[in-house]
Image (spheres, grey):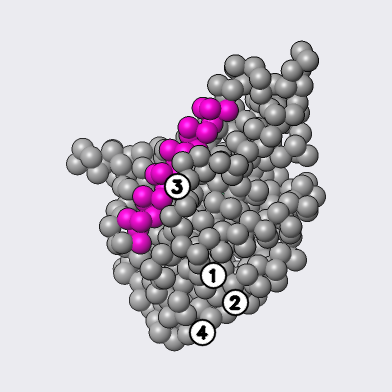
Amino acid sequence: APDGDFYGQLDRLTPEQREVRAQVRTFMTDQVRPIMNVYWNRDEFPQQLIPELRKLDLVRRVWNEDGTRKPDATLVEGLITLEACRVDVSTAVFFGVHAGLAFASIALGGSEEQKAEWLPKMLDLEAVGAFGLTEPEGGSQVSQGMRTTCRRDGDSWVLNGEKYWIGNSPFSDFTVVWARDEDTNEVRGFIVRAGTAGYRVEKIEGKTALRIVENGHVFLEDCRVPEADRLQATRGWRTTAEVLRLTRAGVAWQGVGCALGAYELALGYAQTREQFGKRIGEFQLIQNHLVHMLGNVTSMLALVLRLSDMADAGEMGDEHASLAKVVTAARCRETVALARETFGGNGILLQNGVAKHFADTEAIYSYEGTNEINTLVVGRAITGFSAFV
Ligand code: FAD
């Protein structure tokens, strides 16, 4: 099949699901591909994409206005992610942080009033969200070693601490900040609005992956947040973990999309680049690269399709999402390296495309639970022994 779906696994899609996929593909081809290298070099997110994305109304394909999910939400999110990452992983991350992590925090942890205030604006991309969990001192250990604190003071809370790596935060309208209660030790979530006194974001400069999405270092210095902006329906860390579980399937899809895009670039190059009077695709060793990549992409796709069906049926546990994340990130890393290699020296030039996939894979490999931590989540599930808590 010309689009890398060798077994026709996506033939099962409904007309509505096909339409979402086609819309994202057109958007990525027409709006993102022509400008992405410029913004990669600038280390900047193209703000003009937000009104264009708004027209596609993609968040509504996943969520209802009341914060419940569509019956095929995980699959649809997966298809959006697949088509975005095929061209540019950063675009998928911008969307995933807003429509996944930030939206889910309010949908799962917000009161009816909070959902009514924020979700319609988020569905319309009128308010862009960020999700602040990781801290400078710890990503993997954050459930146990969270240093950001909150303290009740009358009708408000006082937040102190730092958050690191927070996607979209340099320009988001608010960041969901997770903090530990100084009195009860319970983890609480807050909607911290941009412009709040004591809340400051410094953009993280100099990333070598995902340069088109902006990440921030968030400082909370006696930051006062009204009780009304504390997420009212959270149940401590359990809610944070639920949000992460919901979005982990999406990260597994990122690996598939990134690998698929790299494979397609490599196939195209192998069919046109000539050496020794032949197209390089005529050489057995190059065919071996391509078949290895295709095998990876095909098996990864089978895995995430099944994972999404489990998630949408309410049958997915942490360990299922973690196994898919571990396997797809590792196979993606292998695939983009083979694709890069197929381009020879030209593979390290931004203009040839594959270098960006190669770089972005490193972020996929380490965020939303590193390879090690997700491995240990699966290890705990199959042995009954926790090696990390
Ligand atoms: P560490 O936790 O310091 O880990 C370092 C190494 O030690 C890793 O290899 C890890 O696997 C290993 N390790 C740690 N503990 C163990 C153990 N018990 N056993 C074995 N190995 C172990 N966070 C947010 O909250 N919001 C965001 O929007 C966000 N966006 C991100 C975007 C990017 C581009 C990146 C890179 C990160 C983002 N993150 C975000 C943070 C991300 O989730 C963390 O980077 C991730 O959880 C890993 O934490 P760490 O980087 O602090 O690594």
Callout 1: CB less than 8 Å from ligand 1: no
Foreground disc of the pair 3, 1? 3
Residue occupied by mark 1: 59
In percent of the image, x 71 and y 40: which residue is there?
353
Residues at circles 1 and 2 in contact by the CB criterion of under 8 Å = yes
Q: CA distance from mark 2 to mark 3?
A: 31 Å
Q: Which residue, given by chain and number where applicable, does mark 3 sit on?
A: 9
Return the disc, 1 or 2, that comes first in the chain's sequence: 1
Residue type highlighted by circle 1: Val
- Circle 1 Cα neighbour tier, 10 Å, few/some/many (<14 / 14–19 / ≥20): many
Q: Nearer the viewer, mark 2 or mark 3?
A: 3
* Residue 260 percent across, percent down from the top left: 57, 41
Asked whether residue 103 appears in the rendered view, the answer is: no
Q: Position of residue 208 (x, y in %)?
A: 67, 41
Circle 2 is placed at which residue position? Answer: 124
Residue 81 coordinates in the image, percent (x, y):
54, 54
Secondary structure at badge 3 equals: helix
* Dot 4: element: helix
Using the numbered discs, state the Cα–Cα distance from disc 4 to disc 1 in whole angstroms: 16 Å
Q: Residues within 10 Å of mark 2 (few under 14, many from 20)?
A: some
Amino acid at dot 2: Asp
Distance of label 1 from label 2 (alpha carbons): 8 Å
Residue at 54% in and 51% down: 82
